[in-house]
Image: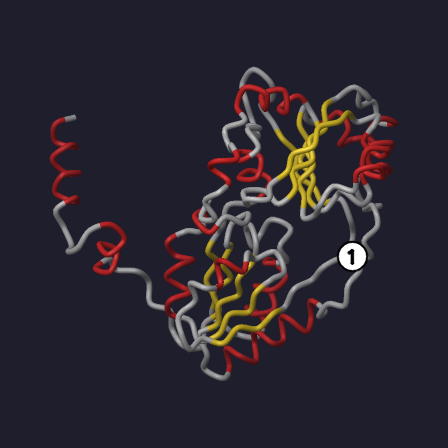
Amino acid sequence: MASENTKVKSWQTQGTGTGFARLDAEAFPTFERGWVWLVGAGPGAPGLMSLLCYHAMQNCDVVVYDALVNPDILRWVRTGAELEYAGKRGGKPSPTQRDISERLIELAQAGKRVLRLKGGDPFMFGRGGEESQSLAKAGVPFRIVPGITAGVGGLAYAGIPATHRDTNHSVIFLTGHDASGKMPVNVDWAAVALASPVIVMYMAVKNLGDIASALMQGGRKGEDPVSIISNASLPQQQVAMTTLAAAGAFVEANEPPTPAIVVVGHASDWRSLLDWYSPSLKANPIG
């Protein structure tokens, strides 16, 4: 233990300056021209970005960003970098996935350092797999920088642990709509219903009534708790509580704000004890 403490103290004396200024001397990976970095910006709060995300924003030539990226994060992009919006929102005019992938390739082949900035994590319902496939096929070099996904970080900000040994040892993550915006038909809802004590759903508010019916038909109990976390980790975060049987009617009557994460199962039971994100903390826009 003593040798480890000595090592830590030696690290603490390295570099110059204090606070974040000490990072200036760190050997961050070089953001080369002609590369695309697919980066997760986290669930919303700027303070939940990674160091590599911030590094990429300080060294890129162009940022191609999604609708779920908090605008307060974009103010940290270096002066002179271009900003290109490529948001996809259900029911609204949006660029196609092919258009976005082709634009990333075009920018990289023009010698730009391209930051593809996504809310949450690029590989968690963020189309990062599809975009990196397109880049790979085009011979464009890329790096993946994971981010905190809303299905974990958003739950934490609501005082809901994604896993807890007294409640659930497993969790299922799934999307609540397909490319057309409807309830996914390729999900085996009967199997999902009883496969895990906790189900975390992205983009599910619109179809929650149909999803709840399918889960109950598969054997899920109607009295199971349901939490709807809107604007997770942001000052305007809201958490609504209902049950699986009442979820559809609740959404129709209350129209919870989106984006939102839906949690089914008794992980929500911990919220009454663990609800730490108080109004005074929400006043800080960094998170």
Is residue 174 shown above or below 91?
Answer: above
Position of residue 265 in the picture relative to residue 222 (left or right): left
- For the point 55% across and 56% down, the residue is 70
The residue under label 1 is 179
Q: Residues within 10 Å of mark 1 (few under 14, many from 20)?
A: few
User: Horizontal and vertical percent for residue 32?
Assistant: 38, 73
- For badge 1, the amino acid type reads Ala
Residue sitting at the far top: 166
Position of residue 24 in the picture relative to residue 58 (left or right): left
Is residue 33 shown above or below 169?
Answer: below
Front residue of 133 and 18: 18
- For the point 61% across and 56% down, the residue is 68
Number of labelled discs? 1
Front residue of 56 and 253: 253
Q: Quadrant of the N terminus?
A: top left
Is residue 34 shown above or below 262?
Answer: below
User: For the residue labelled by badge 1, is the local secondary structure a helix, a strand or a loop?
Assistant: loop
User: Horizontal and vertical percent for residue 201?
Assistant: 69, 39
Front residue of 275 and 32: 275
Position of residue 182 in the picture relative to residue 168 (left or right): right
